[in-house]
Image (cartoon, rainbow, N blue to C red):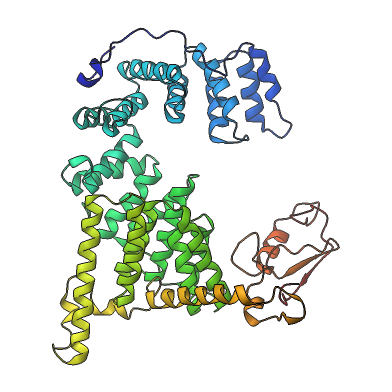
Amino acid sequence: VGFSPTLARMEYVPPPPFTLPFAVSNPAKFVTQWRSTYSDEVKKLIQSAAKGDAESQYQLGMMYLKGEQVKRDTDLAIENLQAAVEGGHKKALYEVSSYFLEIGGDDEEVSAALRFMIQLQGEGLPEAILKIGTLLLDGSYFEQNIEDGLTLIQQAADAGNVEALTILGEIYLHGDYDQAVDNDRAAQYLEKAAKGGDPAAAINLGYCYYYGKGLPVDYEKYFQWMLVATRVEDTDYCRSAEFNIAVAYSLGKGAELNFERAAEWFHRSANSGDLCAAMALAYYYFEGKGVRQSTALALRWYDRAMALSRDARSEDLLNLSMCFLEIDGSPYSLEEAERWFKDADMRGGVNDEKRKAYEEKCKELGEYIECKEKEEKGEVPKGTAAKLGKMVEAAAKDESLAWNPNSVVELRKLAESRYEASKKAPKGGEGAQTSEDDIDAAPLCSICTYRPCNVLFLPCSHAVCCWDCYKELADNADHRGEKCPICVSSIDMAVPMRYDGPV
């Protein structure tokens, strides 16, 4: 087996039979996986796997591992993949080894997984070459060796592995691992990976077109690549792309200026757990931009953003901080940006490069704010602030911006005062009253998730969706007629209703 210099220090011993906790002793047991709800394709795979076909066992294992067409089941996934390994399937061996390296099994399992991964790397399997490269790059299981790690990742990229192309693109785009920033090279890698279907590459390629990094500025292509990234099943990438599409509609860059469409995409992203989108929606409802004005719903989304921030990745908190620095020219921008940056820094997600970018943005915005104050006092000529780099005068007045920090700060104070008042308010009964905010806070449609629920199904008396979603439900009903999404009983009548507050 051919090793890189770093890997050569590990004495190679031919691996023993790789015995897993889920080893298959009787291939006939595959028949027990049968489910009447499975598609014909899955049923054929199960039948073929039961007969010992390694490729079918591999495909079935990957279905269980990813939850595609079947319910996700790690035990059955490893069982099927192990059966494929016994049939000599190399990719199945890679997936099993990768699984144990990721979950960090016991020493024997990890040691065996590493030996097999090294063997597959030596045999030229691109996925294994990439895996060993990333382990060397991050110093996982091996002593960190950036040079050898990059060499192996480059080998995988040359073999056409889209994940390797994406990793190289991100490294040269951000200057990670002490590599010099090379936007042209990064754009080339990302374009190849994006065309190969990698969602992370599609998003980063969109950023390259938006900021002109290695490619000419082209907002339409930025928008198109974000749309491509929303078509994947990966929730993290999808919600990030949805947020960027919403911003495109809110700014009129790459798409026609349309606050209603921006609100729709912010809803999609926020419902998938995006912190920035939830904060944007709080502002949209507070200002009535693209949606009906509702302080109650604004507070609901602000509370949602606060809840998301507690478990958010440091990267998401840093992105929110940078959003405040880029969208407005008020002192509140610095206040909110600093608040979220400190939170991200406390969670250990701020490297030197990101800290430098944040400090440069703060300095730029601080100079702009100071210059604006001098303009108002007549100490400098009008229009001086507009000449300060990218933070131009129009930024503070542009109504198409995603949200206004002044409103967010006001929302924060309102939420805090509401919380204090709630501790003193009666819990219900004679003293309780229904306010306009309670009416605005009607349950949301469980289909679109952002319009108020205003349809009552009869005779079951379930209220689960808005009128628009009900019409779509009715239009797509089959020959059996309309069915209630909750109890699946027939809908004899759908009655528009008004929410009059909590009972």
Image quadrant in which the C terminus is located: bottom right
- Give the quarter of the image for residue 197: top left
Against 380, residue 365 (above or below) is above
- Farthest residue to the bottom: give it: 378
Against 119, residue 444 (above or below) is below
Q: Residue at x 34, y 32 (%)?
A: 161
Against 252, residue 475 (above or below) is above
- Give the quarter of the image for residue 154: top left
User: How many numbered dots are placed on residues in this image?
Assistant: 0
> Left or right: 24 with respect to 433?
left
Q: Percent from the top left, x then y, of residue 314?
A: 37, 52
> Left or right: 175 with respect to 454?
left
Q: Percent from the top left, x then y, of residue 468?
A: 66, 67
- Farthest residue to the front: give it: 424
Do we see residue 327 in this rendering? yes
> Left or right: 50 with respect to 120?
right
- Farthest residue to the left: give it: 380
> Left or right: 53 with respect to 216?
right
Do we see residue 400 in this rendering? no
Q: Residue at x 41, y 51 (%)?
A: 313
Along the viewing direction, whichever of 190 and 235 lies nearer the viewer: 235
Along the viewing direction, whichever of 98 and 231 lies nearer the viewer: 98
Along the viewing direction, whichever of 309 and 283 lies nearer the viewer: 309
Image quadrant in which the N terminus is located: top left
Q: Percent from the top left, x then y, of residue 366?
A: 22, 73
Q: Percent from the top left, x then y, of residue 152?
A: 25, 27
